[in-house]
Amino acid sequence: MTSGLDRYLQEMAERLNATEVKAGFYGGATYPDGELVSQVAAGNEWGDPANHQPPRPFFRIAVKDHKKEWAETIAKGLEQGRDARTVLEVVGAQIKGDVQQSIADLMEPGLSPVTIEKRRTRADRPNSSTKPLVDTGVMIGDVNYEVT
């Protein structure tokens, strides 16, 4: 005879068929010049001292600001009886949006005067924006997630 606890644990095990959601830059997307979006994102996140580029930690800020919300989304989804894949798809979309918003919101550190001048005088696509991280819109558009 199966107890209520045994049934509950079996149902929970069946709902936990997916184990992980990952967010970041997948698929090898590139900028028009061939540079990988994932490499540019890493350079922005951690900085690139060789190019005098300071860290602009959009990803770490998103995690710090939203990890509790993401955990709550998972807990609520499982409490509602959703299977893990569905719950992780929902939280993956939430993470993607939060990372994109973090990119859009980041203003510090600001761009150097040299970078601003280069943006303004480029022949291929001049840009008068002084906003970090969103020069072309490629990186913010490439944020994604996957559930495994």
Image (spheres, rainbow, N blue to C red):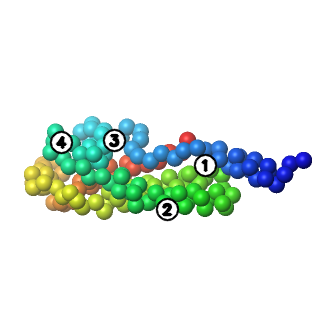
Q: Is residue 98 left or right of residue 118?
A: right
Crowd class of label 2 (few under 14; some 14 to 19; many from 20; radius 10 Å) = some
Residue 85 is tagged as 1
What kind of residue is marked 3? Ser
Q: Nearer the viewer, mark 2 or mark 1?
A: 2
Q: CB of mark 3 within 8 Å of CB of mark 4?
A: no
Disc on the earlier residue, 4 or 1: 4
Q: Secondary structure at mark 4?
A: helix
Disc on the earlier residue, 2 or 3: 3
Q: Is residue 38 left or right of residue 87?
A: left
Crowd class of label 1 (few under 14; some 14 to 19; many from 20; radius 10 Å) = some
* Label 2 to label 3: alpha-carbon separation: 25 Å
What kind of residue is marked 1? Arg
In this view, 72 is above or below 22: below
Q: Position of residue 56 (x, y in %)?
A: 26, 52
Q: Position of residue 83 (x, y in %)?
A: 66, 52
Residue underneath mark 4: 49
Q: Secondary structure at mark 3?
A: helix
Residue underneath mark 3: 38
- Say which residue appears at 23% left-offset and 56% top-offset: 132
* Label 2 to label 1: alpha-carbon separation: 18 Å
